[in-house]
Amino acid sequence: AIAFSPDGKRLAIGGFTQLEILDVATGESQWQSKRRGAFGHSSEVLWTDNNHLLIGKHTLVDLESGKPLWEYSGADKMEYLGGYVWCY
């Protein structure tokens, strides 16, 4: 999956085993995570703000600390609407 940050300065590229954040202006990697199966079978990524990503409908990651803040199971769909991320 590929998703731009809300400010358009970063690009998230993710899959089943890896997630990488790139600086759009320079192409340099700003953050990487390689965790086998950690992002679930879905490769969806959705920025909730400029420092947090919702990955695979179930894991919210803080990019400054590099750690998952929250994990959820049961969502079939996620959308960004009205300034909020909705999982249902």
Image (cartoon, rainbow, N blue to C red):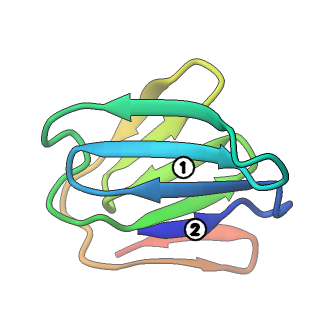
User: Split into 4 quadrants, where in the image is the N terminus?
Assistant: bottom left
Residue lying at 54% horizontally and 49% vertically, measured from the top left? 53
Residue lying at 48% horizontally and 37% vertically, measured from the top left? 61
Residue at the far top in the pictured view? 65
> Left of 9 or right of it: where is 38?
left
Judging depth in this view, the residue of 68 and 26 nearest the camera is: 26
Q: Residues within 10 Å of mark 1 (few under 14, many from 20)?
A: many
Judging depth in this view, the residue of 21 and 45 nearest the camera is: 21
User: Split into 4 quadrants, where in the image is the C terminus?
Assistant: bottom left
Q: Which residue is mark 2?
A: 3
Residue 80 place in picture, x, y as percent: 60, 76
Q: Which residue is mark 1?
A: 53
> Left of 57 or right of it: where is 4?
right
68 above or below 82? above
Q: Amino acid at mark 2?
A: Ala
Q: Amino acid at mark 1?
A: Leu
Q: Quadrant of residue 85?
A: bottom right
**Which element type, helix, strand or loop, lies under badge 1?**
strand
Residue 19 place in picture, x, y as percent: 40, 45
Say whether marks 1 and 2 touch (CB < 8 Å).
Answer: yes
Q: Residues within 10 Å of mark 2 (few under 14, many from 20)?
A: some
Distance, label 1 to label 2, CA atoms, is 10 Å
Residue 79 place in picture, x, y as percent: 51, 79
63 above or below 67? below
